[in-house]
Amino acid sequence: MSDLDGTLLRDDKTVSARTRTTLQAARAAGVRVGIATARPARLALAAVGHLRDVLDVMVVSNGAVVLDAATGAALHEDLLDPAEATRVISSLRGVFPDAGFGWELGDHFEGDAAFNEIAQDPRVLRDTDMGAAREFPADGVHQLVLARHNTNPLGLVAPVADVLGPDYAVSESGGGVVEISPATSTKAAAVTWYAESFGASQANVLAFGDGLNDVPMIRAAGIGVAMASASAAIKASADRIAPTNMDDGVARTIEELVPGVRGE
């Protein structure tokens, strides 16, 4: 199971011929291949449309949804109901009154007026054409996001987590926002669900990542791999360090560890 940005994808958001060939060989050897990303379904599908023929599963929105890669159908969802989402947003607005809030609804994104304005910043990787602003979500959501003008979201992760407490997973993945989900909704939890759905366990999982939101998945996997470009803290959570995404780190590690998959 691999993270996308900075891990499986090269810096130009493509994959090398070697990586594609290695993923194909892994599947032929009986390995189930998947990606796990903070991207919501629509953005993940756009990013890996060229790879869906070599993927079995896609974990999106930091674990809120597990998709069949071939059909795009949801196999599993962990929704935050609108009343609880409203409570969370209200609590955080009281502490961060200048913040904007948005929420993922599967096939589209909504947010409040403040987020709509903040999202004009190209560093905020969320929709800027979300339509009419809403104060709160009216339906169950896959993920909440928070953003502030000219603020590195990494520095907000701990303060937001302090407000919400242990019932919520708070992270960021380089998209200009703080990502907020129920504690049950993480990449690690989704990968566990998927493995158990066909009689396997986390002990059978080889997981790759380079970001804060990958740490639970890396720690839970039978073999957790951090990319060479990851921070020291993320590397400390891993069993192994792979070469960078620009040096086919995922492919090289699979070739080394998976029987029946040969490298160049």
Image (spheres, rainbow, N blue to C red):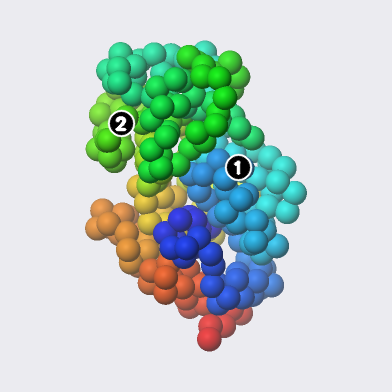
Tell me the amino acid under the disc marked 2: His
Is 113 on the left-hand or right-hand side of 45?
left
Residue ID at (52%, 13%): 83
Residue ID at (41%, 18%): 89
**Element at badge 1?**
helix
Say if residue 39 shows up in the picture: yes
Say if residue 58 shows up in the picture: no
Residue holding disc 2: 149
Is 252 on the left-hand or right-hand side of 201?
left
Residue ID at (46%, 20%): 112
Residue holding disc 1: 41
In the displayed orientation, state which residue is furthest to the right: 71
Residue ID at (27%, 35%): 151
Question: From the viewer's perspective, is the residue at label 1 or at label 2 nearer?
Answer: 2
Q: Residues within 10 Å of mark 2 (few under 14, many from 20)?
A: some
Q: Is residue 6 above or below residue 257?
A: above
Q: Is residue 201 above or below residue 256?
A: above
Earlier sequence position, callout 1 versus callout 2: 1
Q: Residues within 10 Å of mark 1 (few under 14, many from 20)?
A: many
Camera-nearest residue between 190 and 195: 190
Image coordinates of residue 216 in percent, x first then y, are 40, 47
